[in-house]
Image (cartoon, coloured by chain):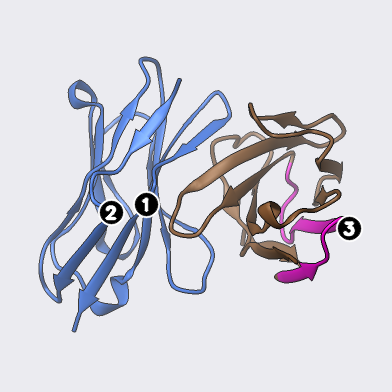
Amino acid sequence: GAVVSQHPSWVICKSGTSVKIECRSLDFQATTMFWYRQFPKQSLMLMATSNEGSKATYEQGVEKDKFLINHASLTLSTLTVTSAHPEDSSFYICSASPPGQSYEQYFGPGTRLTVT
Amino acid sequence: AQSVSQHNHHVILSEAASLELGCNYSYGGTVNLFWYVQYPGQHLQLLLKYFSGDPLVKGIKGFEAEFIKSKFSFNLRKPSVQWSDTAEYFCAAINAGKSTFGDGTTLTVKP
């Protein structure tokens, strides 16, 4: 149980375009989902926390208008990288927490974004 | 601000050797501590966690960790590593919904 999927697993886009990444909890409802960014050989940096039905809470230094997060249902959260630039190239990972278990996080496999 | 530091960036061991990976956190209040593992090409998986109670926590695959409050440490241990333990290991602290990860330790186990 507690499986989280991400789609796509990798994507290449041109500079200036937008890319949407989906995060789904497959066998449980996730009231809270987290989005992380991981640079090569570095740790996960929390970008934002999203709660179903409300606005996401962004970490300091993360541009809200650039990284749009929508958590429209208890099983789906999306991250849209708008007007992507090469420096946005990274590994994006989501995690999800079941209701009442805010400290438990189940991680998705990640999405490799390359902006050319 | 909450922070997590992992002392060892890259550890190389032979099979059957004992393992200890250091993790220190900085936060004065209640904090929940985790160790995650990321095998090559796979996603993060939970090894073990500490919320409260017995400071010696046992996790999957023979791993354990000890929470020492006075040292703000949560070191990961395994008495005898296997080649299949080759992976990236992350220590994390979660408090009030905020997650902070260490930089990770790459463990390479030589057969």
Residue B10, disc: none
Query: CB of mark 2 within 8 Å of CB of mark 1?
Result: yes
- The spot of residue A16 in percent (x, y) is 87, 55
Residue at mark 1 to residue at mark 3: CA–CA distance: 32 Å
Residue at 81% x, 41% y is A66
Query: CB of mark 1 within 8 Å of CB of mark 3?
Result: no
Task: Please determine whether, in this image, residue A4 is positioned above or below residue A60.
Answer: below
- On the same chain: label 2 and label 1? yes
Q: Residues within 10 Å of mark 3 (few under 14, many from 20)?
A: few
Start-end of magenta stretch = A10-30
- Label 1, secondary structure: give it: loop
Disc number lying in front (1 or 3)? 3
Residue B9, disc: 2
Does residue B96 appear anywhere in the picture? Answer: yes
As drawn, is B103 to the left or to the right of A95? left
Residue at 84% x, 35% y is A65
> Is residue A28 found inside the magenta-colored segment of the image?
yes
Q: Which chain is blue?
A: B
User: Which image quadrant is residue A12 in?
Assistant: bottom right
Q: Residues within 10 Å of mark 1 (few under 14, many from 20)?
A: many
Task: Please determine whether, in this image, residue B62 is positioned above or below residue A76.
Answer: below
Quadrant location, the C terminus of chain B: bottom left
Residue B104, disc: 1
Q: Chain A is which colour?
A: brown
Which residue is labeled 3 in the image?
A17
Does residue A97 appear anywhere in the picture? Answer: no
Residue at mark 2 to residue at mark 1: CA–CA distance: 7 Å
- The spot of residue B87 in percent (x, y) is 36, 67
